[in-house]
Image (cartoon, helix red, strand yellow):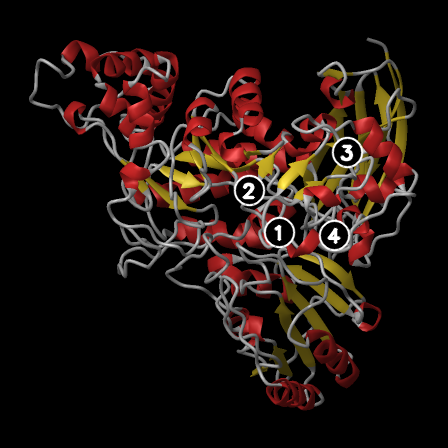
């Protein structure tokens, strides 16, 4: 255990710790010592906020306050004590790291460790106790406004990337707060939608990254989400928190609300909530009076119930213990270090993570650019100059320096080429439901100017896509459709017609329609890349860095290819309970049955009268069914043999790779991978496991292992994967346990979920 240091030694000797107390290394002993000296009022006061982003400690005993900060892509600028306004500090600029979609696209756990360590150093320097992240909800719909903050559609990939992030972050003595627990896969109706999902899908998919964060990553806190599950808000949900998180998984940290996610004193007391933040706000804009904190659900109402004897001591002490444990692990830990901000190491890390996460989706030989002296490069698109660290909701950042794509391209090519710029389109600014309406004449003017300039350029580099406006990639609201906004499809089509040497760079945290793809010679999937966005993009475009990113989610051809949308409004965004079709009504307050859901899905949901719109325009109590059950993402596309535009795990390179014939010896699979091209590169070798025959419906295959391997031209390496029993199991929701059935399994080795290079068989006997 770490040694614990009390920063303040109170002078009230009869009620405070003595030297013998503070010499003990054991955190649990320290927790119990503190607890024995606390009054009821002090215990209760630990459980609710004192400002917008802080909660009190126990001043009398020298227990410091808790200071939280939004993340997870960097440390947010300082916010006012009691409202959402920026405090206006001049020393709170940070290094903006790439969004977590980019981190997931690296398929490199070492990058996650580096990311967590670097952002943790900045949080520590800013004296933050808890960084609110990482986000590990899964990609269920491409309309989700917060997908850019998450790690894709596969729970194994998300788990493998979040665990080292957490460990790197907490190595600085700063707690992560893994979010949003649980089933928060959309922003529409997020404050009240009641999610219905089978236990099998819950355990196999949506809880897997949280389980890994707790049991492998050792997360010190968890954030409860806004939505409901089984008619109860997730932030004080008896089944999610008491039964699963704390009892089944043994989580010993603190459960913290999302801001404004608490709704009920009794549920907050008895259903496992430990720290209440932001009540009486909507989590974004609504303000509360400065004197309102005692009115929180875990404030004076909780204290009064305790005084009346309505709350057992075991519950009072459990909440206090968890908060004390959090503080002892962070603010009161000796040898915690001081952290650092904007160091050269942080900037280099942000650039490297961005380089490794950028995904090359198409290339007909145009990339890397072959420039010559005197060439003209035209950069088009608002995202080439727009700050993409601003906006987006709580993940907004104030970087010390944000290198735009235009700046990065000028710095890389400007010594040999003329680099010009045309905006091409404009989006305006919008936040939290207010969207700027721009005149059509402005769109026409900007488009026509860009197209005319493109005719005279040697190369056109288009940098567009989504942004962090409301109804784009932004907290508090989902996208409205699958298309690129602001007339970009027409602009891209006309640019491609004007200049065949056009490179398309699309910035987004989501998939989108591509009606122009067939005519595009090169397509780069960028993400929100942070401080070093322009440098990292120029590194890829120039060929200084060989692209190696792989997609963490599937790109379908159209929105209704995704099962959440194929189902109609009952699958997204939810319908009034009286509009629920059969067989999806289920039993109130009980998990849904996986077998029934899958049976309906396999039959094409025939005979089910799906609602196309939320019932009666209701704004409360919508119910949503995860009717695709365990067949999320590529699992659905595999099972129903549905073609996708770009599959999960896909990404091109400037070199080529060949795979040898895989072999299996016992439980160990071996495959050789060779670089058959002319430049050094990295390949992500993916191992999927499939169960040929099972007593339940299972996906065709599921990702169970991956390895990113660096290869010089002509080099060959052997990649191995040893099968574990856990890799073969499914969650049996009739027995409530994980089961591996004897029989034949297949191990698929590929460079994406669709590009399978070899298959070997494996017989399992339990």
* CA distance separating discs 3 and 4: 25 Å
Q: Secondary structure at mark 3?
A: loop
Residue designated by label 3: 630
| Mark 1 surroundings: few (<14), some (14-19) or many (≥20) residues within 10 A | many
User: Circles 3 and 1: CB distance less than 8 Å?
Assistant: no
Residue 488, image x, y percentages: 68, 75
Residue designated by label 4: 651
* CA distance separating discs 2 and 3: 29 Å
Which image quarter: residue 384? Answer: bottom right
- Residue at 28% x, 22% y is 43
| Mark 4 surroundings: few (<14), some (14-19) or many (≥20) residues within 10 A | many
Residue designated by label 1: 357
Of the residues under marks 3 and 1, which one precedes in the sequence? Answer: 1
Residue designated by label 2: 111
User: Circles 4 and 2: CB distance less than 8 Å?
Assistant: no
Which image quarter: residue 546? Answer: bottom right
Of the residues under marks 3 and 4, which one precedes in the sequence? Answer: 3
């Amino acid at each position: 255990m770490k040694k614990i240091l009390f920063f303040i030694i109170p002078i009230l000797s009869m009620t405070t710790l003595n030297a013998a107390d503070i010499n003990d290394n054991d955190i649990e002993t320290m927790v119990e010592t503190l607890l024995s000296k606390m009054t009821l009022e002090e215990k209760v006061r630990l459980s609710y906020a004192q400002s917008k982003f802080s909660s009190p400690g126990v001043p009398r005993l020298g227990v410091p306050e808790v200071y939280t900060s939004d993340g997870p892509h960097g440390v947010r600028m300082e916010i006012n004590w009691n409202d959402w306004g920026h405090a206006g500090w001049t020393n709170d600029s940070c290094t903006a790291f790439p969004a977590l979609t980019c981190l997931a696209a690296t398929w490199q756990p070492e990058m996650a460790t580096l990311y967590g360590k670097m952002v943790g150093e900045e949080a520590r320097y800013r004296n933050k106790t808890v960084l609110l992240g990482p986000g590990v909800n899964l990609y269920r719909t491409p309309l989700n406004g917060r997908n850019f903050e998450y790690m894709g559609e596969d729970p194994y990939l998300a788990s493998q990337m979040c665990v080292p992030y957490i460990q790197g972050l907490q190595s600085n003595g700063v707690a992560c707060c893994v979010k949003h627990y649980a089933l928060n896969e959309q922003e529409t109706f997020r404050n009240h939608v009641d999610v219905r999902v089978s236990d099998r899908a819950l355990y196999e998919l949506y809880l897997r990254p949280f389980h890994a964060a707790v049991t492998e990553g050792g997360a010190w806190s968890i954030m409860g989400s806004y939505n409901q599950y089984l008619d109860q808000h997730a932030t004080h949900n008896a089944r999610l928190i008491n039964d699963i998180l704390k009892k089944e998984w043994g989580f010993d940290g603190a459960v913290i609300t999302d801001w404004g996610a608490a709704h009920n004193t009794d549920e907050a007391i008895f259903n496992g909530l430990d720290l209440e933040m932001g009540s009486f706000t909507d989590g974004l804009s609504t303000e509360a009076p400065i004197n309102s904190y005692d009115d929180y659900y875990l404030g004076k109402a909780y204290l009064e119930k305790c005084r009346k004897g309505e709350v057992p001591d075991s519950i009072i002490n459990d909440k206090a213990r968890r908060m004390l444990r959090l503080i002892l692990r962070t603010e009161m830990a000796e040898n915690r270090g001081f952290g650092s901000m904007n160091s050269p190491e942080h900037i280099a890390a942000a650039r490297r993570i961005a380089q490794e996460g950028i995904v090359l989706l198409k290339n007909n030989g145009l990339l890397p650019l072959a420039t010559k002296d005197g060439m003209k490069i035209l950069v088009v698109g608002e995202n080439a100059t727009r700050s993409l660290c601003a906006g987006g909701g709580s993940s907004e950042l104030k970087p010390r320096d944000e290198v735009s794509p235009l700046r990065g391209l000028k710095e890389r090519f400007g010594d040999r080429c003329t680099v010009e710029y045309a905006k091409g389109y404009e989006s305006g600014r919008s936040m939290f439901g207010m969207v700027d309406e721009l005149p059509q004449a402005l769109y026409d003017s900007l488009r026509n100017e860009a197209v005319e300039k493109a005719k005279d350029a040697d190369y056109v580099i288009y940098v567009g896509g989504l942004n962090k406006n409301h109804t784009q990639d932004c907290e508090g609201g989902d996208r409205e459709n699958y298309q690129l906004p602001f007339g970009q499809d027409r602009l891209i089509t006309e640019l491609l017609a004007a200049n065949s040497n056009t490179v398309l760079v699309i910035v987004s945290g989501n998939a989108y329609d591509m009606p122009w793809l067939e005519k595009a010679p090169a397509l780069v999937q960028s993400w929100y890349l942070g401080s070093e966005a322009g440098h990292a993009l120029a590194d890829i475009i120039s060929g200084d860095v060989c692209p190696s990113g792989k997609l963490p989610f599937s790109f379908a051809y159209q929105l209704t290819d995704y099962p959440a949308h194929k189902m109609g409004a009952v699958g997204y965004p939810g319908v009034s309970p009286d509009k629920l079709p059969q067989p999806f009504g289920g039993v109130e307050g009980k998990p849904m049955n996986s077998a029934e859901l899958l049976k309906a899905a396999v039959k094409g949901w025939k005979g089910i009268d799906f609602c196309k719109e939320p019932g009666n325009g209701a704004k409360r109590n919508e119910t949503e069914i995860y009717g695709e059950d365990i067949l999320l993402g590529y699992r659905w596309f595999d099972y129903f043999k549905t073609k996708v535009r770009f599959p999960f795990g896909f990404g091109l390179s400037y070199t080529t790779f060949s795979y040898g014939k895989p072999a299996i010896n016992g439980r160990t699979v071996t495959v050789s991978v060779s670089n058959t091209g002319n430049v050094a590169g990295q390949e992500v070798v993916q191992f999927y496991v499939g169960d040929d025959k099972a007593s339940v419906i299972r996906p065709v295959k599921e990702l169970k292992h991956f390895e990113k391997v660096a290869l010089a031209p002509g080099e060959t390496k052997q990649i191995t994967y040893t099968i574990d029993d856990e890799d073969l199991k499914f969650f049996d929701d009739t027995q409530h346990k994980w089961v591996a059935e004897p029989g034949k399994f297949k191990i698929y080795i590929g460079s994406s979920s669709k590009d399978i290079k070899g298959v070997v068989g494996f017989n399992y006997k339990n």
